[in-house]
Image (cartoon, rainbow, N blue to C red):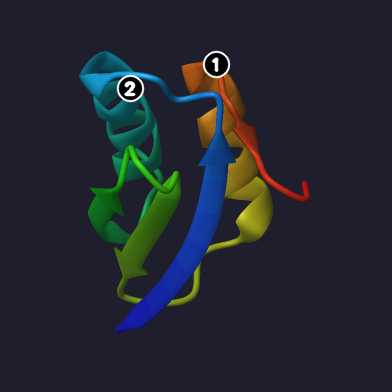
Amino acid sequence: MATSTYTVTGMTCGHCVASVRREIAGIPGVTGVDVDLETGRVQVESAAPIDSAAVLAAVDEAGYRLADA
């Protein structure tokens, strides 16, 4: 089991959280996604390490940005 933590910028509501969660959950191998609206923290759990580029693309698809990306 691997866990990675990211910070997403631009989220302002529950719909934002749901969009980010849905896109990241669609990455093959992801087994869990926890999104904290207040801090922008996103914790991704997976069976094996997930490529950060895949997370970046998923967050971008949801309409948001990764901090420091």
Callout 2 crowding tier (Cα within 10 Å): few <14, some 14–19, many ≥20: some
Sequence order check, earlier mark of 2 and 1: 2
Question: Residue drawn 63% across and 57% down?
Answer: 52
Disc 1, SS: loop
Mark 2 to mark 1: distance in Å? 8 Å
- The vertical placement of 36 against 2, above or below, is above
Of the pair 12 and 24, the residue shown nearer to us: 12
Q: Which residue position is annotated with label 1?
A: 63
Identity, as a three-letter code, of the amino acid under mark 2: Ser
Question: Residue drawn 55% across and 16% down?
Answer: 63
Question: Residue drawn 52% across and 33% down?
Answer: 58
Of the pair 34 and 51, the residue shown nearer to us: 34
- The vertical placement of 3 against 68, above or below, is below
Compared across the picture, whether 53 is left or right of 22 comes to right
The location of residue 32, given as percent across then percent down, is 22, 58
The location of residue 11, given as percent across then percent down, is 44, 25
Q: Quadrant of residue 57?
A: top right
Q: Residue furthest right?
A: 69
Q: Which residue position is annotated with label 2?
A: 19
Disc 2, SS: helix
Q: Is the Cβ of the residue at disc 2 closer than 8 Å to that at disc 1?
A: yes
